Image (tube, rainbow, N blue to C red):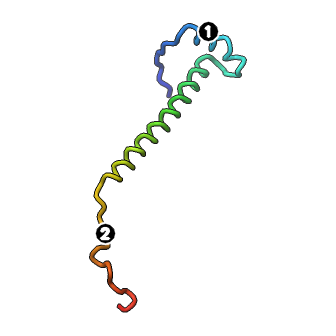
Amino acid sequence: MLIQTKIQLEPENYDFIKRVYKELNYKSLSEYMRQAVNAQIKEDRKRLRAFKRRQAMEMIGKGPYTHHFEDIDGEDFESR
């Protein structure tokens, strides 16, 4: 179910959209707007994921390195 919301556009952008949406094979003005908003949201989600990934990598790099196999380091496993 879609949620109705209001947006504000600059007059020249609205006039352009109103003139060309049929030429670009959109069913309606609303479909054009919906696809434009969805494209922007998709791009913003990618950008946000990349930002969070970059932050996580920086946090990993700042953390102390713990050697998990320190207690068994140097043991000869072949002779066991």
The percent position of residue 77, horizontal first and vertical second, equals 37, 86
Q: Which residue is mark 1?
A: 15
Q: Which residue is mark 2?
A: 68
Q: Residue furthest bottom?
A: 79
Residue at 38%, 44% in the rendered image: 55
Q: Residues within 10 Å of mark 2 (few under 14, many from 20)?
A: few
The percent position of residue 11, horizontal first and vertical second, equals 55, 7
Residue at 48%, 33% in the rendered image: 44
Tag 2 secondary structure: loop
Q: Quadrant of residue 25?
A: top right
Question: Where does the C terminus fall, quadrant-wise?
Answer: bottom left
- Looking at marks 1 and 2 on the same chain, the residue that comes earlier in the sequence is marked by 1
The image's mark for residue 56 is none
Q: Is residue 25 above or below residue 78?
A: above
Left of 28 or right of it: where is 74? left
Q: Is residue 70 above or below residue 35?
A: below
Please tell me which residue lies in front, 16 or 76: 76
* Three-letter amino acid code of the residue under disc 2: His
Please tell me which residue lies in front, 51 or 39: 51
Query: Which is more foreground, mark 1 or mark 2?
Result: 2
Tag 1 secondary structure: helix
